[in-house]
Image (tube, rainbow, N blue to C red):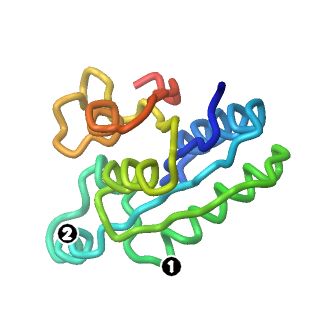
Amino acid sequence: MGYRNVVVGTDGSATAEIAVTHAAEIAKTFGARLTIVTAYVHDVMKEARKSEPLPYEMQWMAKDVNEAEARAKRGKALAKKLGLKDVVVRVGNTDPALALIEAAEAGGGDLIVTGNRGISQATRAIKGNVPNKVSHHAPCDVLIVHTTDG
């Protein structure tokens, strides 16, 4: 049995690289494809830049497709460095949690890997929490990797 398509999200952060590394190791172990997903939320960022500085929980969001693609390519390079050959990148103008779920549905993903950033005691109630949304709506297994102490 085992996993055939592992899906992981990245926002380009150091904590996301930990999740990508875990996902790559799992994919390597099972000989699975690794799908690296990143998202940008253009309309949200456009409005947010007009007002106050972005709150911490929104700073990771890519502002446009070019930035999102660059983040995904860094994740792909990391996976290739770890020895994976079958690596796919998906970039979407959507909510990051939805991008992960859609990637799993569209590509036959049987495991979604995400970091725990955003589910600590202090930030658990933040609306839009990616690990929380994914864990409740994923069409497959979910692994939440401990990437932070917060």
Question: Disc 1 on helix, strand or loop?
Answer: helix
Q: Which residue position holds label 1?
A: 66
Q: Quadrant of residue 52?
A: bottom left
Residue 132: percent from left, percent from top? 29, 33
Which amino acid type is marked by label 2? Ala
Which of the two discs, 1 and 2, labels the residue nearer the N terminus?
A: 2
59 to the left or right of 148:
left
Residue 35: percent from left, percent from top? 59, 53
Question: Disc 2 on helix, strand or loop?
Answer: helix
- What residue lies at 52% left-to-right and 64% top-to-bottom? 90
Other residues around mark 1 within 10 Å, as few (<14) / some (14–19) / many (≥20): few
- Taking depth in this image into account, of 76 and 45 the one nearest to the observer is 76
100 versus 65 height, above or below: above
Q: CA distance from mark 1 to mark 2?
A: 18 Å
Residue 96: percent from left, percent from top? 35, 54
33 to the left or right of 43:
right
Q: Quadrant of residue 87?
A: bottom right
Q: Which residue position holds label 2?
A: 48
Q: Dividing the image into 4 quarters, which one contains the N terminus?
A: top right
